[in-house]
Amino acid sequence: MGQMFYKISKNDTISPVSSTGIFGSYTTNGTWFGALFQRLYINEDRWRVTAAIGAGNINYQYFQDIPVFGGGAFIGFNTKADFGLLNIDRRLFSKLYFGLLGIYANSKTVFDLPDFIPPDLATDTRSMNTIGYSFNFDMRDNQLNPYSGYYLYFRNNFFRDWLGSDNDFEMYSISYNHFIPIKSPRDIIATRLHASIAAGDVPFQGQNVVGQEDIRGYSEGRYRGDQVYTLQAEYRHRFQNRFGVVGFFGMATAFDSFSELDNAPFLPGGGVGIRYMVIEQMRINIGLDAALGKDDWGIYFRIGESFGR
């Protein structure tokens, strides 16, 4: 991963720094993924533009309950995918922004099923093009590494056949991040509440998966559903030099509908991390986190802080 940070206009003292980045990954199970991404803050932060393109070949797995066998099993799958994204936000007043979003996404998923399953039933080629809108209220003192303030975000995506999507459904994303300084900016409590909700004719590729930012410590892909809810808190301490440490803990759950809430899994996750501030005047950190989940774990490299959106 590499990112370049810069100001579009030297006379603009209000806009945060813009950035251009490239990301690539390869894993020992043959997965690869690459993306180019762009984030622009324009005209004294009146406009915010995010764009990205990418492609990958992903080998992953999901957990399938099989009650007749008294348990379940992991089922592997391969997804070849490419995508493009464009999001434009306009400040309405104060710190309230309204945005429009468009995503092109195409994928081919092949499930690792027994030989007696016909190949056409084990293969799923699917387009998931979408448009949507968003509102966000951004009171953070810095977008990359906040020391104080809060960020409220809501997004609603529509997947429709007239957009070329193979399924008609909606996706809702709601998050609230709060950053509380303790005595000084060197000690911060960061909290995050997040919900991802899919409704309608939701395909396998449209489900939400527990992991990554929501929540660290889950990498196997075992827990997924139409709805995922998470609650997290993180303590951040920065030493007198550029080094810092973090400790975090959270909880998550995943299910398809509220009728399953009584049997929804309780998924705790927590860990620790180290930070190094590579560009002090812009508060840009790099870091490494190690996290434990329920029968799972993960290690995460990052540019910037967690709870970005």
Image: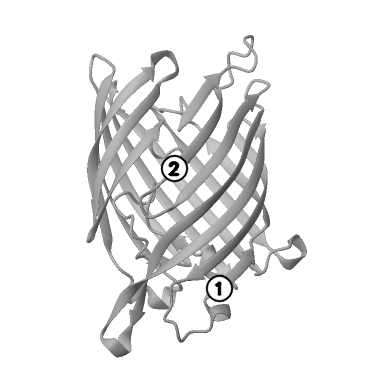
- The 10 Å Cα crowd at callout 2, few under 14, some 14 to 19, many 20 or more, is few
Q: Residue at x 62, y 26 (%)?
A: 41
Q: CA distance from mark 2 to mark 1?
A: 25 Å
Query: Whole-percent x and y of residue 187?
Result: 26, 26
Where residue 162 appears, as percent x and y from the top left, is 77, 64
State whether residue 172 appears in this view.
yes
Q: Secondary structure at mark 2?
A: strand
Residue farthest top in this picture: 11
Residue 183 lies in what quarter of the image? top left
**Labelled pair 2, 1 in contact (Cβ < 8 Å):** no
* Label 1 neighbour load within 10 Å: few <14, some 14-19, many 20+: some
Under mark 2, the amino acid is Ser
The residue that appears at 45% across and 37% down in the rendered structure is 308
Helix, strand or loop status at disc 1: strand
Q: Which mark is residue 229?
A: none
As drawn, the residue found furthest toward the bottom would be: 68
Residue 302 to residue 153: above or below: above
Q: Which residue is mark 2?
A: 25
Q: Position of residue 132 (x, y in %)?
A: 66, 52
Position of 66 compared to 160: left or right? left
Mark 2 or 1, nearer chain start? 2
Label at residue 123: 1
Amino acid type assigned to the residue bearing label 1 in the image: Thr
Q: Quadrant of the N terminus?
A: top left
The residue at 22%/61% (across/down) is: 295
Residue at point 48%, 84% (across, down): 117
